[in-house]
Structures are given as structure tokens and as C-alpha cells.
Image (cartoon, rainbow, N blue to C red):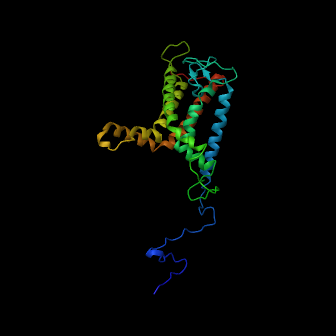
Amino acid sequence: MTTTAPRGSGAVSPGAGGGTAGPRRAAIAARTLRTDRWWLEPLLTVVALVLFIAYSTFRAFQNDHYYASPYISPFYSPCITTRCEGSSFPEFITGPAWISPALYILVLPLGIRLTCYYYRKAYYRSFWLSPPACAVAEPHRRYTGETRLPLVGQNVHRYFLYAALVFNVILFYEAIRAFRDETGEWGHMGLGTLVLLANAVLLFLYSVSCHSCRHIVGGRLNSFSRHPLRYKAWTSVSKLNARHMQYAWISLFGVAFADFYVLLLATGTISDPRFF
């Protein structure tokens, strides 16, 4: 004798071939059953990224007030055009005077931020609502992943990481150079020196905590026991990777603050406090 479970009881009935049919997913018409402020995080992400994009775009096109001896804004470093003020690098790009030196180099820092695994999650959720939050339905009918243009370009992230590591070295160099005064003598240290140094450290932590960096250090190995040095390095990078989100946001605000500090000095709004 065959019995049938009552509808909605959650029991399964025998299927064809002697198997059992799995329970169906619950049909929920509501967008979400969450009662917390799930929309607050994507909203704050939109606000923060829009403010940074607006500020950095304005500063990149301003083409002025980016050098206050001995400090140069990280938005303009390395300054490699023939019309660059305060450059310590070879000036080999000759272009129209109206093109800001920042436009020649910002594409690389922008590239690592745009393709970063964490930032992808952040702006996919906040700008594209894909999905806006956990357990919240997205408005899109289908999901194609990162297999089509332009999102297939996200696969170049590791190459932007290589470029970012070069920029990290340059920013450390500029921070060390800021220990010299206007005459070129060593022994100067002002608040701006510490600002540039802190910015270089934060951007370096953001780079080395990257998921791609973790894979580069410890990937393609079948046995960690045969590579103890790489295992130790992978362990260290993994600890940093656990805080990658924090480093991403702190370094984003840090680089904007470093540029803003140089702007205030260059316009004469404030003076640089000197420690020695």
C-alpha cells in the first residue's frame, strides 16, 4: 500500500526509479524577510566611493597645488612629465600643458582598486545590487558572472597588483625624500613627512594583503612541507589577508588625506608643523 504525505508536511514522496524527490524550495514573494537595516552598508559604500571618486577626479584634473616642498601628492607621484613640479623622477613624457601629470599614472592605482576582489564585492552590491545584501533578492533576472565584457577584464587584477607594488616602492621613496628640507639637507621631519610615510605603509599593507598576492606567495604548490619559506610567507600574508577589507578602506581614505594635506600646504592654508 502506498501512502502520500500531506501537503506542506516537509516529507518526501517516492520518486521514479525507486528514488526520492527532494523537497522544493520555499516560494517567498517578499524581497527579503530581514528586519534589520541591511540597506545601510551598501548605502554607505555608495556614498564613500562617490565622494572619493569625485574628489580624486577633481584633483587629477586640477593640475595644480600638488607640490609643497619637500612633499608631493601621492596622486601625482611619480611625476614623469616635462611640466611636472617637484619631480624626482626622469621626465620623459611631453604632452599638452592642459593634461594633468596625474592622468598619466592614476590609471594603474585605479586599476587595482577597480579589479580588487573585495572592491568587486563592495561595488557589485552597492551600485549594481548584485545582490544588495545576504538573503536579499536582487532585481536582475539572471547572473552571467564575469564571463562577458566588460567584467571579463577583472582577470587582469594580478597584473595591476604587480604595478601597484612598484608604486609602493615609489611612495616609500617619496616619503624618505621628505626627510630633506627645501635646501636638500637631510634631517628634516614635519607632520607631512609622517603623513606621506603612513600613506605608503597603508598602501603597502593593502597590496600585500590582496588575495592575488596570497596566491602568488603560496599558490601552485602540492606540498608546503617541501617549501618552508614559502609556507611561512604564505602564513604571514594570510594573516594580513584576513584584514584586507579594513586595509582597503583605511588606505583609500589615507591616500585622499595625504593629497588633501599637500593641497592645504601648497595653497598656504596651513603651515607644516616641524619636529626637527
What is the quadrant of residue 93 in the picture? top right
Is residue 92 positioned above or below 12 on the image? above
**One can see residue 276 in this view:** no
Tell me if residue 43 comes above or below residue 158 in the rendering. Answer: below
Q: Position of residue 72 (x, y in %)?
A: 58, 23
Vertical arrangement, residue 8 with respect to residue 242, above or below: below
Residue 32 at what x, y percent from top left? 61, 62
Q: Which residue: 62% across, 48% down?
A: 126
Which percent across, then down, holds residue 24? Answer: 54, 70
Describe residue 238's horizontal placement relative to residue 51 as left or right: left
Instruction: Report the side of 202 relative to 149 (left or right).
Output: left
Give the quadrant of the N terminus.
bottom left
Residue at 68% in and 31% down: 58
Residue 82 can be seen in this image: yes
Q: Residue furthest front?
A: 17
Total number of numbered labels? 0
Single out the residue that lies furthest toward the bottom: 1
Q: Quarter of the image holding residue 79?
A: top right
Q: Furthest residue to the left?
A: 226
Q: Residue furthest right?
A: 98
Q: Nearer the viewer, residue 140 or 129?
A: 140
Could you say which is closer to the camera, residue 227 or residue 176? 227
Q: Position of residue 228 (x, y in %)?
A: 31, 39
